[in-house]
Amino acid sequence: MMIYVNGQDIHKLICANLSNNQDQVLVDQTDSGPEGYMKAFCSFLEKINCSLNDIEKLFVVIGPGSATALRGSLSLINTLAFTKGIGLVGIEKKSDEQDIDTINKILEQGLSTFEVKNVLIPIYEHNPRITISTKDVLRRKV
């Protein structure tokens, strides 16, 4: 079975079963933050009568998007893929693009044409905003 997962938005997880034909793609949206992604993903698998052992590939949105949301979804997905030997396909998706449009592009291109990876790395929406310390190693102001 091949599953689409989008954890790009901090407020929801979107999953879809790509194994059915294009007219019967089940898209499931769960309003949950990253702390609920595992429960939402397992709930989706139950809905489609699928176990983790049945998954061959995960098509996962890697960004650009919220750093917190992407770290949460990709750490879950990378862990599942590593422990279960599941192939990963990273998908770039603009935040204003509808998931069904992204799914249709994947299906039109063909599920077997994508490069499979072992680990996915997120693409963040913004560069990190790290400030340089104004103190030395002894925490004295410099």
Image (tube, rainbow, N blue to C red):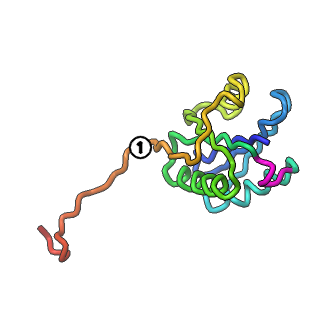
Query: Residue at image x 54%, y 50%?
Result: 70
Please identify the residue farthest to the bottom as the structure is shown: 138
Residue 95, image x and y in percent? Answer: 56, 36
Residue extent of the magenta highlight: 50-55
Q: Indicate yes or no whether the magenta region holds residue 142.
A: no
Which quadrant would the N terminus be assigned to in this image?
top right
Q: Amino acid at mark 1?
A: His
Which residue is the extreme one toward the top? 108
Residue 72, compared with residue 141, is above or below; it is above
Q: Residue furthest left?
A: 142
Magenta-colored stretch includes residue 51: yes
Q: Position of residue 84 (x, y in %)?
A: 70, 55
Q: Is residue 33 visible?
A: no
Q: Is residue 137 in view? A: yes
- What is the residue that sits farthest to the front in this orientation? 85
Q: Position of residue 38 (x, y in %)?
A: 69, 59
Residue plotted at (11% across, 67% down) = 142
What residue sits 77% from the left and 57% below the top? Answer: 42
> SS at mark 1?
loop
Q: Where's residue 23, x and y in %?
A: 84, 27
Quarter residue 62 falls in: top right
Image: 78 above or below 2: below
The answer to whether residue 141 is above or below residue 1 is: below
**Residue neighbourhood size for the residue with mark 1, other residues' Cα within 10 Å, grouped as few (<14), some (14–19), many (≥20):** few
| Residue 36 horizontal side relative to residue 44, left or right | left
Residue appearing at x 37%, y 50% in the figure: 128
Q: How many marks?
A: 1
Instruction: Answer left or right for 72 relative to 59.
Output: left
Provide the residue designation for mark 1. 126
